[in-house]
Image: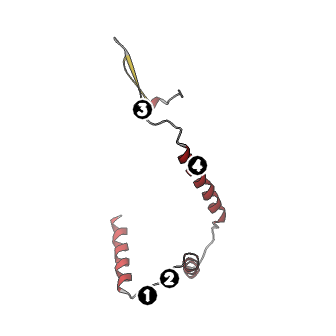
Amino acid sequence: MKEKSKSEVSIIGGADGPTSIFIAGRTRKKPLKVRMRNIIYRYRRKIVEKKVVADSHTLDELVQYAMNTYNLIETNSTERKYIEQQKNLKESLILQ
């Protein structure tokens, strides 16, 4: 059995009778599937971190990049749905 830290072990009794030791918490070893998923995540993150370049861009460049990369479309700011979503966004930011 691996050695546990002090916060994970509780000892009850011992003064005049049998001692009980309780080990709480999970073991540090995770299932293989979880470990593989974490390894893949870290690998992908490293790749993305290498591609990300800190540089200043204009708002127009950012909009053009989003449109080209994610096939986004720019909506008309006078449409009712756009105005409603903008109000909802403001309300959620105020509540946060």
Determine if residue 14 is in view: no
* Picture disc at residue 22: none
For disc 4, the marked residue is 36
Mark pair 2, 1: CA separation: 10 Å
| Discs 2/4, front | 4
**Residue type at mark 1?**
Asn
Mark positioned earlier in the residue sequence (1 or 3) = 3
**Residue type at mark 3?**
Ala
**Residue type at mark 2?**
Ile
Mark pair 2, 4: CA separation: 37 Å
Mark pair 1, 3: CA separation: 57 Å
SS assignment at label 2: loop
Dot 2 surroundings within 10 Å: few (below 14), some, or many (20 or more)? few
For disc 1, the marked residue is 76
Mark pair 1, 4: CA separation: 45 Å
User: Taking 12 as reference, is 43 left or right?
Assistant: right
Q: State if disc 4 and disc 2 touch (CB < 8 Å).
A: no
* Picture disc at residue 24: 3
Dot 1 surroundings within 10 Å: few (below 14), some, or many (20 or more)? few
Q: State if disc 3 and disc 1 touch (CB < 8 Å).
A: no
| Residue at far front of view | 33
**Residue type at mark 4?**
Met
Where residue 63 sits: x, y (%)? 54, 80
* Picture disc at residue 73: 2
Where residue 42 sits: x, y (%)? 60, 53
SS assignment at label 3: loop
In depth, the one of 33 and 71 nearer the eye is 33
Where residue 66 sits: x, y (%)? 55, 77
